[in-house]
Amino acid sequence: QVQLVESGGGLVQAGGSLRLSCTASGRTFSRLAMGWFRQAPGKEREFVAAINWSGGSTDYLDSVKGRFTISRDNAKNTAYLRMNSLKPEDTAVYYCAADRVGWNTRRDWNSYAYWGTGTQVTVSS
């Protein structure tokens, strides 16, 4: 079993930055791929970014490429999502998730076995 806890959300003006953190406990973190998803009110859950177990492979939603960076520190059991140049349309609850298929980066939220409870990101215009 894996427990995930997100932190770092908040209110920021358009153009600002935030860094989300996701700390894992339980199963060996370094064997897991990690993903970030988001869900805005009235919308479906959306893939944002993923990173494989080693950090050697990443994937991003097109609309966040060049603005967001996913990374991980296996020694700290933590994954990160650095978000720059934030836009009002980035407003959502952001969730981190862990995939037991550690070598891959997958976009389908059904592929992820473990989820955090989410952190709110609000970008004002």
Image (cartoon, rainbow, N blue to C red):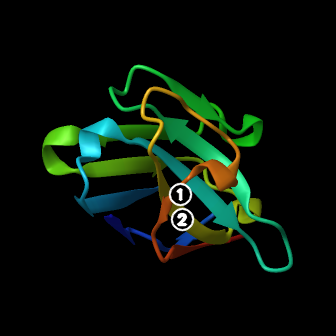
Horizontal arrangement in the rendering, residue 81 relative to residue 63 (left or right): left
The label shown at residue 95 is: 2
Horizontal arrangement in the rendering, residue 34 relative to residue 120 (left or right): left
Disc 1 element: loop
> Relative to 118, does residue 68 appear above or below in the rendering?
above
Please state the horizontal and vertical placement of residue 17, each as a whole percent of the image.
48, 55
Which residue occupies 71% across, 68% down? 39
Please state the horizontal and vertical placement of residue 96, each as a whole percent of the image.
48, 59
53 or 64: nearer the viewer: 53
Q: Residues within 10 Å of mark 2 (few under 14, many from 20)?
A: many
Task: Give the quarter of the image for residue 24.
Answer: bottom left
The reply to whether callout 1 and callout 2 are in contact (CB within 8 Å) is no
Judged from this view, the residue extending furthest toward the top is 56
Judged from this view, the residue extending furthest toward the left is 75
Which residue occupies 49% across, 57% down? 97
> Relative to 89, does residue 30 appear above or below in the rendering?
above
Q: Amino acid at mark 2?
A: Tyr
**Mark 1 vs mark 2: in front:** 2
Task: Give the quarter of the image for residue 109.
Answer: bottom right
Please state the horizontal and vertical placement of residue 70, each as a whole percent of the image.
46, 40
